[in-house]
Image (cartoon, rainbow, N blue to C red):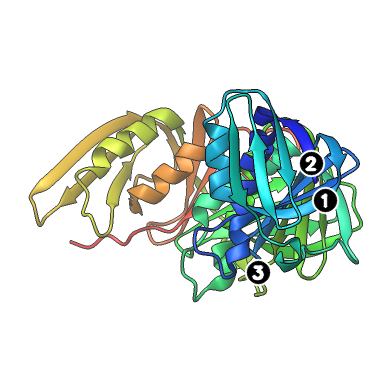
């Protein structure tokens, strides 16, 4: 096996593929990239069994072949080289030689036979989606997933396809986010739970706007775009009935400037009790007072913001960290905070949704004790 390739082009594809390599894999060969050269195309595969990344690029090959190459030493070498053509050769004993303008680097590869097979797209349903919408769906929901392995379903993001709509949903029982993309034309009605690690890799790999082919079967979901495919093993669990917790009637509504609210929360949260992160919102027709106190240390802080509120004056407590995470991913200048009573969930929604999209964020109140 022998081929020539641009060092920076190779590094770019390896950086994408390196996302699926864990530091302490189950099998030592999973610390490697699988290189497969066939008729001037190099296919690179990496896997941690939960996520598999397959990406390809053009090379000038004198000889086809397949080899597993240790990822760390190869990445470190390429990062330390300026852009230039390099030649990689492999001998019959899996010895790998990299030839650059500066010199020669030798390392030992592993037999490709030991590398795990990647999942095939058997018996799949497929739809096309714009990459920007996928990125937005992941960004808007990933922070709301749970880290509790005992509630396996909630550690992933629910992707729910409902003929003309696709919902991204995440919850950890304290907060919930639902981002909806409309105007789809599919005959698919399916719910899939995708691990957040795999979706983070998908989000990071989508550097340019493009159409993404999403295919899935009972076991895996495949995201294909450009010359890259990312395969994620689905979470085998049942997602909670999330619609049941979204309040239908939230008659009171406050319209607040998002950045002002976020900045105020960041300052006030410094004075909140560290175990509850509780901030108190006291909302009247024209203003909202945000306050926090930590009685253990005699710390307290108060600020006042302008807002437009329709409803009876209300005092409600929330976790400042959760509110901050939500306001941070929203993009609008103003947001609506929709409430009913101090003991029921509040909703944060944009004042205006993008055409064909809807975003709803729910946060449970923190009960106010003395």
Q: Position of residue 138 (x, y in %)?
A: 62, 47
Report the residue at 67% width, 47% height from top: 96
Residue 89 shows up from this direction: yes
Secondary element type, mark 1: strand
Q: Nearer the viewer, residue 231 or 59?
A: 59
Q: Check disc 2 and report the residue beneath it.
A: 2
Q: Nearer the viewer, residue 72 or 13?
A: 72
Q: Please tell me whether residue 323 is drawn above or below residue 267 in the rendered image.
A: below
For marks 3 and 2, give the CA distance: 40 Å
Whether the residues at callouts 1 and 3 have beta carbons within 8 Å, the answer is: no
**What label sits on residue 235 in the rendered view?**
3
Based on the displayed image, in which of its 4 quarters is residue 137 positioned? top right
Q: Please tell me whether residue 60 is drawn above or below residue 1 in the rendered image.
A: above
Secondary element type, mark 2: strand
Q: Check disc 1 and report the residue beneath it.
A: 65
Report the residue at 84% width, 37% height from top: 61
């Amino acid at each position: 096996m022998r081929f020539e390739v641009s060092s920076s082009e190779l590094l770019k594809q390896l950086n994408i593929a390196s996302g699926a390599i864990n530091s302490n894999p189950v099998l030592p060969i999973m610390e490697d990239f699988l290189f497969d050269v066939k008729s001037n195309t190099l296919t690179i595969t990496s896997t941690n069994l939960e996520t598999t990344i397959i990406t390809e690029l053009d090379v000038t090959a004198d000889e086809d072949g397949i080899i597993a190459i240790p990822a760390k030493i190869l990445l470190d070498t390429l990062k330390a080289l300026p852009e230039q053509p390099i030649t990689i050769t492999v001998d019959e004993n899996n010895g790998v030689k990299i030839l650059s303008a500066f010199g020669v680097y030798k390392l030992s590869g592993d037999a490709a036979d030991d590398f795990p097979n990647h999942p095939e797209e058997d018996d799949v349903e497929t739809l096309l989606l714009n990459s920007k919408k996928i990125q937005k769906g992941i960004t808007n929901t990933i922070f709301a997933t749970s880290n509790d392995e005992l509630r396996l379903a909630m550690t992933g993001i629910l992707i729910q396809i409902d003929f003309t709509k696709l919902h991204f949903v995440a919850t950890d029982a304290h907060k919930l986010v639902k981002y909806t993309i409309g105007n789809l034309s599919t005959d698919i009605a399916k719910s899939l739970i995708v691990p957040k690690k795999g979706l983070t890799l998908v989000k990071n790999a989508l550097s340019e706007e493009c159409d993404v082919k999403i295919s899935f079967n009972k076991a895996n979901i495949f995201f294909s775009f450009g010359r890259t495919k990312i395969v994620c093993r689905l979470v085998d669990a049942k997602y909670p009935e999330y619609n049941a917790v979204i309040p239908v009637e939230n008659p009171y509504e406050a319209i607040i400037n998002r950045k002002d609210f976020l900045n105020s929360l960041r300052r006030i949260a410094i004075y909140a009790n560290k175990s509850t992160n509780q901030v108190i919102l006291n909302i009247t027709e024209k203003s909202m007072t945000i306050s926090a106190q930590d009685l253990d240390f005699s710390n307290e802080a108060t600020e006042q913001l302008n807002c437009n509120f329709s409803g009876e004056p209300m005092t409600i407590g929330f976790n400042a960290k959760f509110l901050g995470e939500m306001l941070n991913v929203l993009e609008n200048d103003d947001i609506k905070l929709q409430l009913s009573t101090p003991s029921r969930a509040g909703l944060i929604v944009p004042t205006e949704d993008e055409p064909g999209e809807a975003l709803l964020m729910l946060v449970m109140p923190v009960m106010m004790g003395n």
